[in-house]
Amino acid sequence: MRRREVFLSAGLVFLIALVVRIVAASLVVFPQPEDTAYYVGVARNLLEGHGLTSDALWSYGTPPLRFPRPAFEVWLPLPTFVAAIPMALVGATFASAQLSSVVVGAIVPVLAWRLGADAATERRLSLSRTRVLALGAGLTSAVYLPLVLHSALPDSTMPFAALALAACLLMPRILRDAGRVRLTSPKVIALGVLIGLAALTRNEAVFLGLAWLVAVWRTPVLERSRKLALVAMPAAVALAIFVPWMVRDWLVFGNPLPGQALSNALSVTGFDIFAWNDPPTLARYLAEGPQRLLLMRAEGLYHNLFTVLLLPGIPAAFLGLIALPWFIRLRAIVPLAVLSITTFLVTSLLFPVSTTWGTYLHAAGPAHVLLIVCALLALDAAIERVGQMRGWTRPVAWLGGALTIFGSLLFMAALMPSFGGLSVGLTQRYEALAAQMEAAGLPLEEQGPVITNFPIWLSESTGARALALPAESPADVLDLASTFEGTRLLILQGDDHGDWPAVLDTNAAGAECFDEIDIGTPADPRLARALENTRVYRLVCP
C-alpha cells in the first residue's frame, strides 16, 4: 500500500475506535472492578501531593501495614502515571482518567490493523485482499467487546495490550535485517523501551522477553554470538527502565520484586488475597490433595479460555482459536503467539485460583488481537477456496471482515449498556451509604479505618480509610481491628464474603462483639435498592 493509503486506513481505524470508546466510556461512570479504582485513586493522591499512596489496605502480605499505604506492593505504576496526565489537565476525576484509557485503547485496533497487513503480506495475498484483511482486523478490534470494555477502564489492560502489540510488531521488522542491524539502532532500542514500559504495567511483560528470545533463535542465518547480542541489548534497555522501580520497591517494601504476587500461586481460594492470620503457605496448599489441585487447574483453564477469551469475543474468538494452528508459524504471528500462549498457560496452571479473580483477564488483550487476526486469515482462505470451487469472478474477500465486524458490533452493543448499568448501581450504592452514615452520625471520612469487603471502592467513593475484610473468623477480624487504632466499624455489601456475614449468627468466638447498626433506608427507591444487602456493624468489644 502507498504511504497515503496507509495513513488514511490507519486513521480511519483509529477514528472509529476512538468514537466507539468515547461512547462506551460515557456509559461507565464508576471504576469497576476494584483494581481500576486503585489506579485512579493513587493517581489522585499523586496529583494532590501525597505521592504513590492509597487510602485502602486491600492486602496484608507486604509490610509496612500503615496509612497512608505505599502503593503497588503487587501491581505496577505505569497505568497510574498514564491516568494522571489527563487528570492533571482537566480535573482529578474518574471521567478524566478514562480519557487516557480511551486514547490508548483506540491505538490497539491500529496495531491490530498493522498486524493483519503484515500477516497478509507474508502470505503473499493480493493487494485488495491485504487491504480487506487489515481493515477487517482493525475495525473488528475497534468494536470487539473485551477491547472496548477495558478501554473505558483506566487500568493495566489497555496499556499492556498496546505496548505488547507494538513490541510484537517490531520484532519481525528487526529480524528482517538481523544480520546487518546495529545493536544500537533505533528499532533495537525501541524494543527494549517497549518491554521495559510493559514491565512497569504488568508482570506478564517477562513473556515478551521470551517471545523475543524465541523469535531470535528461530532465525537460522544468525550466529550464536549475534543471537545473544540481539537478545541482550533490548534486555539491558528494559532493565535500565525497570531497575529504578525495583529500587523504589526495595526501599519501601524491603523487596525489589513483587514477592506477594508469587505467593498468590499458593492460594486455595480467591479470598486468600485478603488473608490476615491465615496466609497462603506451601503446606496448606499441598494439604488440598492431588485431586483438588488438578481441579483448580481445570477451573483456571476453563475460566481463562471460555470466560475471558471465547464467550466475550463471539464470533471472532471461536474462529480464531480453531484457525490458530494453521497460522501460528507465520513470522508476523510468532511473537504474539508465544506471548499469548505462555501467558495463558502460566496464569492458568501456576495461578489457577488468582486467575479466576482477574489475573489473566487484564493480560489477555494481545491474545484477543491474535484470535481476531487468525479468524480473518481463516475466513479469507475459506472464501478464496469457495470462490475457486464455485467459479466466482467478483471479489468477495470483504465477507470475512463483514462477518467479524458485524458479529462483534452486535455483541458489544447488546452487552456494553448492561455493564454501564452496573456502574450506575455502584455509584448509587456508595452515594446512599455515605448519606445514610452521615444521617446516622457516623460520617465515614471522620471514622477510623473501616473494615469492609470492598475496601478500594469504599475508600475512593467516600474518602474513608479502608481495610479489607479477611475471610477468617470473627476473632481474627477483631485481631485485625486491634492492630489498626480506631477501627470500630465493619461494613458488608453485596454478596457473601466467604462465611461472612453468616458466621456472626453462630457461636464462633468473637461473634458477640459485632453489633449491627440500623442506618435507615433512603427515601429514593433507587438508592434503597442500591443499599440492599448492606450491613453495618459496630465493634463493641475493647
Image (cartoon, rainbow, N blue to C red):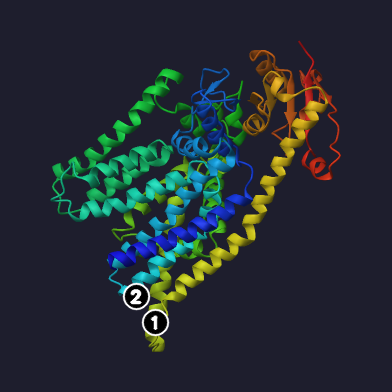
Type of residue at label 2?
A: Ser
Left or right: 423 as drawn, with respect to 322? right
Neighbourhood count class around disc 2 (C-alpha, 10 Å): few under 14, some 14–19, many 20 upward: few
Left or right: 218 as drawn, with respect to 295? left
What residue does disc 1 label? 395
User: Considering only order in the chain, which callout, 1 or 2, is on the residue closer to the N terminus?
Assistant: 2
Q: Are marks 2 and 1 in contact (CB under 8 Å)?
A: yes
Q: In which quarter of the image is residue 191?
A: top left
Q: In which quarter of the image is residue 33?
A: top right
Location of residue 295 in the rendering, given as x and y in whole percent from the top left corner: 56, 44
Q: Quadrant of residue 129?
A: bottom left
What's the mark number on residue 86?
Answer: none
Location of residue 402 in the rendering, given as x and y in whole percent from the top left corner: 49, 72
Left or right: 273 as drawn, with respect to 418? left
Type of residue at label 1?
A: Pro
Res. 286 in view: no
Res. 51 in view: yes
Is 193 above or below relative to 462? Answer: below
Distance from the alpha carbon under mark 2 to that under mark 1: 9 Å
Q: Residue at x 40, y 35 (%)?
A: 200
Total tally of numbered discs in the picture: 2
Is 38 above or below relative to 12? Answer: above
What's the mark number on residue 128?
Answer: 2
Q: Which residue is drawn at 54% across and 45% down?
A: 300
Near-viewer residue (132 or 364): 132
Q: Residue at x 31, y 58 (%)?
A: 332
> What secondary structure is found at the residue carrying circle 2?
helix
Location of residue 67 in the rendering, given as x and y in whole percent from the top left corner: 58, 18
Q: Which residue is drawn at 64% across and 61% down?
A: 414
Location of residue 218 in the rendering, given as x and y in whole percent from the top left corner: 23, 52
Which residue is farthest front?
Answer: 90
